[in-house]
Image (spheres, rainbow, N blue to C red):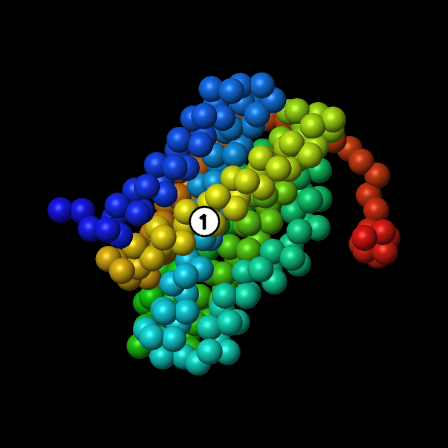
Amino acid sequence: MPTRKHTVLLAVIGFGCTSFLQVARRGGSVAPLLPIMAAVFIAFLVIGAALPVLPLHVHETLGLGTFLVGLVAGSQFAAAIVSRVWAGRHADRSGAKAAVVMGLLIAAAAGLLYFLSLSFITTPAMSVTFLLLGRALLGVGESFIITGAQTWGLAIRGVRNTSKVLAWVGSAMFGAFAAGAPIGTALYARYGFSGIALATTLLPVATLALVATLPRVEPTQRMQAGFLKVFSAV
């Protein structure tokens, strides 16, 4: 008999699927973005799934303090910031699809590091080291996925639809964060951190099958601006 937790989880997943179907029926400028939005949604689902359970795993399972809990949680976002420029250059030179594919492969590798960290549960220092590496690698993958997806969407819809593209891709990303939290909690309650590691490994690989069917967009050659020039403009 389904519990209340399972009912809420199914409702969240159903709401996300229904939203995508409603957008597809409307067509217009959003319909061509649906495969890219789906790729972003699935990829960022694994990020959202880990966020609520990382403190439990690091503090309760590994027995480590609150500082390391914060360090493990924040390492992904620090790596995402550092790798943003690198991801943008890769998308410009190799194409948006190549950037998304690269990000998905990196994200799957992060899941493998999650699994490796579980092999050292009895040695918390070693386990958290591999977990930190996995979180950092996931942050790099996040940069490549979101940068490539936005560039891809702009190439499909054109710069006149920049705001729409950024809004819809961003909606898929934050929708994944929202749905990932209850899904990650349910996985952790039933399978422990192994369930999170498995999802982090398999979902990006499954998304690769979706991305592989999409047409490639030729990279656009642009004048490269230095980091300091961009920073001063911001």
Q: Quadrant of residue 98?
A: top right
Q: Quadrant of residue 227?
A: bottom right
- From the viewer's perspective, tell me whether residue 19 is left or right of residue 184: right
Task: Say few, some or many: other residues with alpha carbon within 10 Å of mark 1 (under 14 / 14 to 19 / 20 or more).
Answer: some
Determine the residue positioned at 70% across, 32% down.
162
Front-lying residue, 234 or 202: 234
- From the viewer's perspective, tell me whether residue 187 is left or right of residue 40: left
Q: Is residue 113 above or below residue 145?
A: below
The kind of residue tagged 1 is: Ala
Q: Is residue 121 above or below residue 224?
A: below
- From the viewer's perspective, tell me whether residue 66 is left or right of residue 89: left
Q: How many marks?
A: 1
* Residue 189 placement (x, y as % from top left): 27, 60
* Residue 2 placement (x, y as % from top left): 18, 47
- The local secondary structure at tag 1 comes to helix
Determine the residue positioned at 25% across, 48% down.
6
Front-lying residue, 116 or 54: 54
Residue 53 appears anywhere in the view: yes
Residue placed farthest to the left in the image?
A: 1
Q: Is residue 15 above or below residue 161?
A: below
- In the picture of the structure, the residue carrying the numbered disc 1 is 178
Determine the residue positioned at 47% across, 19% down.
25
